[in-house]
Amino acid sequence: MMDRLHIPKRLQRFVLPAIIIPLVVLYPEYYTQLGTSQLIPTLSTAVVMTVFVTMAVGLNMVVGYAGLLDLGYVAFYAAGSYVAGWFASDQFATHHFVFGAVGVQGNAIGIHVSIWILLAVAALFAAMLGVMIGLPTLRLRGDYLALVTLGFGEIIPQVVRNGDALFGQNITNGVAGITPIDPMGFKYAHGVLPFLPDNFLLTPNLDVWYYRVGLLLVAVTVFCSIRLRDSRLGRAWVALREDEIAAAAMGVPLMRVKTLAYASGAFFGGAAGCFYGTYQGGAIPDNFKLYISTLVLAMVILGGMGNVWGVCLGAAVLSYLNQQGLGAIGNQINSSFGTNIEITKYEAGLFGLIIVLMMLFRPQGLIPSARRKAEFDVIREEAETAGVAA
Amino acid sequence: MSLDGPAILETRAARKEFGGLIACSDIDFAVPEKSIVSLIGPNGAGKTTFFNMLTGAYKPTAGEILFDGHEVGGLPPHTITRLGVGRTFQNIRLFQTMTAVENVLVGMHTRLRGGIIRSILHTPGIKREERQAHENARELLRYCQLPERVYDEYAMNLSYGDQRRLEVARALGTEPKLLLLDEPTAGMNPQESAEFTSFVSRLRDERGLTILLIEHDMKVVMGVSERITVLDHGEKIAEGTPIEIQQNDRVIEAYLGSGAAGTAGHGAARA
């Protein structure tokens, strides 16, 4: 079994990060030397991977730490994208407001605020939305909560799709979505540190810079996630996941702590959505389907609920497959065997298969948290004793 | 003995109904400050329902519950805990995949301040608070006589006796004025029960706690309680010192049936 593979603590703490972090950060510098195989992630795939890793680490706070099954996470991702759409495009053409935006004239139509500011705004907006959705729904438990969040995950994209005439206002521009969204850039820092480009769109390879910002987003998310995990709030989350009644009796205010979990997760979902919106240059309703919610949840489960590093790995693997890997594997198969299978069409089925196989052979995830591992060890022991008894 | 002190907990006609079933019927009850009081009664007498009203798990149908000058009937559990009511559970309800220290730290939740932003920034204030909290948690575990080697073990890996002790340590983490113990010696052997009895006395004497016990083990009840209240069918049928309770007809009847009381020569028949 893989979990017999014991990695010494010291190695885990220092050596592995010392190898992995440079490999990840320097990826744009060496990936062209890895060969021309379609399997090598392109930089644009890598950018999307950072978006999904951010989202998965955010969702992990809700599902992994606090044990609240959330099937509507895509709502926050959409909210973040639309914040970028509203405040960094021509959407509100009657306004003329430019603040630190990149690549627009001072008298441009619409509202154009710097994406750096919008990342924070989007995160806060999503967190607020999280509180608003959370307050009425978080009184529910388990499956009921999952169903209601599933509903919200469906409602919000519908609202967005039909939001071109809300109370006579065109808020979301309907199915066409809001496009183009302003690019990122170091408008002011460029003057002081010239190696920072003032507009990513004008650099030779914009993906390099978006990849770096994406990694920064991942780093901030992982950092906050770990700090929260080890805090008073993080302990309350685990306690309420374990036993709500006992947690309340020990003075943990359930609603408050659950809402904070939900809002924290939403916060990073919103930031990821804003970043993705500016990278894609648009906020388009078709990007915010239920499928995204289940995909991010699958990343958390595959990686190992509750373990930040496991979740990062799970998200990287699945988003790679989703974005590029499956198609590349399909092409390899087709060219080797002369077949003509469009493997990407089977994507949802294949991800389902991966999850089923994981549940059968390694239910605790690729890199489980110590708590989950302890839980699953007990379950397995019980199953084995039951097997012996039968 | 401190039975004449002012009551820290008082219920006036506290009542709980579930549909047509009256689980607790207009119970008047008082726990004097720094006393050790027991609540006994046959299975289904309404003891745990009464406990659950005191701790906020159930909202009383009618009546008042006063704790330390506050009306607490119907308040959420965490508010009542913050006011100073700590409890343990009849069927151990520890946080299984948290260590012993972490369990106690969760108990300290309302006594710590760390918010979301300061926790992320790890301000010096937070560091100090966390360090102090960890020290206090270990101190409590020591006080409750848990062996040092289990402090960082998951609760699920602790022996039964240690789990019982950890429940008390976790409840002490809430810094209670009143400690409610729900059948704390269930599953203990006579020697462990005896040790626990003296521990309960120490809690009162050394930490100035008021203690309310639900207990089935009569040896424990008679040994440690200063006053005993007996419930049967949701009603208070007797109240008094251990000696008085031992000689009370209605109590004997409730535990052994009306025939037993009859043969004892008193014949206090009750419908």
Image: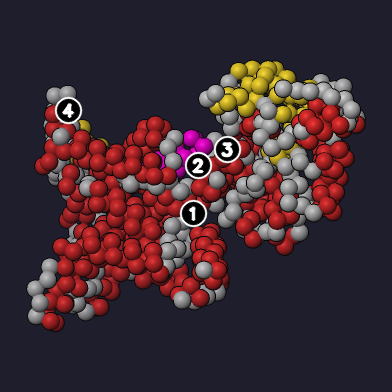
Task: Identify the residue under disc 2.
Answer: B116
Q: Tell me: A60 left or right of B229.
A: left
User: Does B66 lie within the magenta span?
Assistant: no
Please report contact status of discs 4 and 1: CB closer than 8 Å, yes or no: no
Real-space Cα distance between discs 1 and 2? 12 Å
Q: Is label 2 or label 3 in front?
A: 3
User: SS for tag 4?
Assistant: loop
Q: Nearer the viewer, residue B194 or B86?
A: B194
User: Does A257 lie within the magenta span?
Assistant: yes
Q: Is label 4 or label 3 in front?
A: 3
Residue A196 shows in the view: no
Real-space Cα distance between discs 3 and 1? 24 Å
Residue B119 image point, x, y percent? 53, 45
Please report contact status of discs 4 and 3: CB closer than 8 Å, yes or no: no
Task: Identify the residue under disc 4.
Answer: A166
Q: Give me the chain letter of mark 2.
A: B
Q: Is label 3 or label 1 in front?
A: 3
User: Of the residues shown, which amino acid type is indicated by label 2?
Assistant: Ile
User: SS for tag 1?
Assistant: helix
Q: Give me the chain letter of mark 4.
A: A
Task: Identify the residue under disc 3.
Answer: A248
Q: Tell me: B132 left or right of B219.
A: left
Real-space Cα distance between discs 4 and 2? 35 Å
To the question of a shared chain for discs 4 and 3, the answer is yes
Q: Nearer the viewer, residue B254 or B81?
A: B254
